[in-house]
Amino acid sequence: METQLKRGFLDICVLAALAREDSYGYQIIKDVPSTLELSESTLYPILKRLKTQGMLEEYTREHNGRLRKYYTITDKGRAALQDFVQEEAGITQILAYIREGAQS
């Protein structure tokens, strides 16, 4: 998948993963569709940006004797996720337009 297109989906996929359950970095990478090829070097700036925007919060919990940072989606993050889902009709129209052009 083309890099620019992936970038457009990464934030929303991270929010979608956290909407299912609170999680930590490595697990989020495993949960996001592999076609996006999400790596740690890409994920952590996304998490920081989403936290700065108030779309998620973080907390620590002990796991196997050490602290692990977990992330949870906020109401603002859920609203952004819902807004994206509500734009599905527009996205579908764009994809149909692209398919039509590709078949010409």
Image (tube, rainbow, N blue to C red):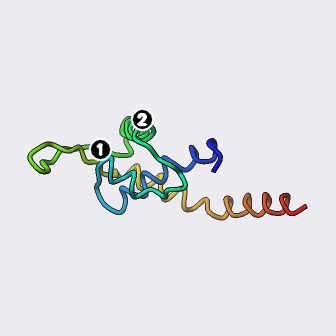
Q: Secondary structure at mark 1?
A: strand
Check disc 2 and report its element: helix, strand or loop: helix
Query: Residue 27's spot in the image, x, y percent?
Result: 33, 54
Label ID, residue 45 = 2
Q: Residue at the location (43% across, 39% down)? A: 46
Instruction: Calculate the distance from the C-alpha at mark 1 to the C-alpha at mark 2.
Output: 14 Å
Q: Which residue is mark 1?
A: 57
Quick one: 86 or 49, which is closer to the camera? 49
Q: Which mark is residue 101?
A: none
Q: Amino acid at mark 2?
A: Pro
Nearest to the observer: residue 5 or residue 76:
5
Q: Quadrant of the C terminus?
A: bottom right
Residue at the (33%, 49%) spot, across then down: 26
Report the amino acid beneath label 1: Glu
Circle 2 crowding by C-alpha within 10 Å: few under 14, some 14–19, many from 20:
few
Residue lying farthest to the left in this orientation: 65
- What is the x, y in percent for residue 76? 40, 49
53 left or right of 25 in image: right
Labels 1, 2: front one: 2
Which is more toward the observer, 41 or 19?
A: 41
The number of callouts visible is: 2
